Image: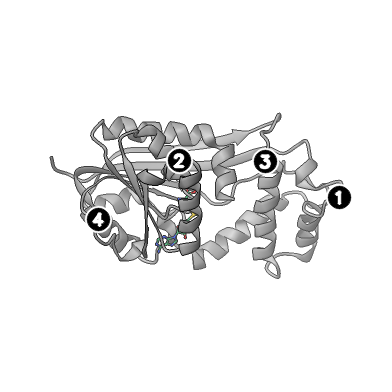
Amino acid sequence: MLDLDAALFASYLTTVTGRVACLAGSDVTHIVDLGAGTGTGTFALLEQFPAARVTAVDSSAEMLDRLTEAARARGLGDRVSVLEADAGAGLPGITDADLVWASASLHHLDDPAAALAGIHTALRPGGLLAVAELDGMPRFLPADAVPDRPGLETRCRDALDTLHTEHVPHLGADWGALLTVAGLTVEQERTEQLELRSPLPEGAGRYAHLTLGGIRGTLDGRIDPADLAALDALLDGGPQDVRHRDDLVVRSTRQLWVARRPGR
Ligand SMILES: C[S@@+](CC[C@H](N)C(=O)[O-])C[C@H]1O[C@@H](n2cnc3c(N)ncnc32)[C@H](O)[C@@H]1O
């Protein structure tokens, strides 16, 4: 899913990491990818910063194994090291980072303020933190996609938002304010609406299927059974299945904050 997202929105990832590279300047040698997952950010950053190495931090050993394997396969094994750690409790042993990249990861942490204090310590004076976030699940369907259940996707998103308020309370946080409180100076803040339309790139239908399948599982028992049945019809391989519809539009809202540790 993470790799598919990065492939579909590859030009956005290149643009965003390029913006970060412009602000970071040329003397970046050590980057930390916080909550690195499969390494989508790690690999995009290694392209932008040819002289840098990346420490990929994640609390999941499985993710780090995948990332290590992917780095080896790309011939980048000597530029990537991994650190299995809970980033909410600081970044052990790191005090010299020129850049910390945190994409879709900070909202997972129990105490983002404590995590930002740890990032502040890990950055050298003058170093940058880039926070990339999204506003929740991407959207795929026109409002009338399922004629007898108009507004299906909107209702699913509303139900997910309610769940997230309880279980992922930092999703949608005002990161600019939190970065400032952590003693970092926000230099850039942007929101972008991404949209992929027909002809859709390879993998878009599968991405919609994976995303809506996850939503269906999460909302089982939490929304009207008729909405669940309509979701099933979008996933079951039949005529309405999102993997072969021609009316899909992939929409996603992405945000970026770039902040600097004062000094030097
Ligand atoms: C949505 S994924 C984002 C992965 C990657 N940054 C990307 O943009 O493709 C979130 C990642 O954060 C990791 N994560 C969650 N909580 C964490 C924690 N407390 N410390 C370190 N990593 C964590 C997860 O294991 C997962 O790999």
Q: Amino acid at mark 3?
A: Gly
The residue under the point 86% across, 50% down is 238
Q: Position of residue 1 (x, y in %)?
A: 59, 50
For the residue labelled by badge 3, is the local secondary structure a helix, a strand or a loop? loop
For the residue labelled by badge 1, is the local secondary structure a helix, a strand or a loop? loop
* Label at residue 197: none
Q: Residue furthest left?
A: 264
Residue annotated with mark 4: 94
Q: Amino acid at mark 4?
A: Ile
Report the mark closest to the observer, 1 or 3: 3
Q: Is residue 153 left or right of residue 88?
A: right
Badge 4 or badge 1: first in the primary sequence: 4
Report the mark closest to the observer, 3 or 4: 4
The residue under the point 46% across, 33% down is 14
Residue annotated with mark 3: 203
For the residue labelled by badge 2, is the local secondary structure a helix, a strand or a loop? loop
Q: Position of residue 70 (x, y in %)?
A: 50, 47
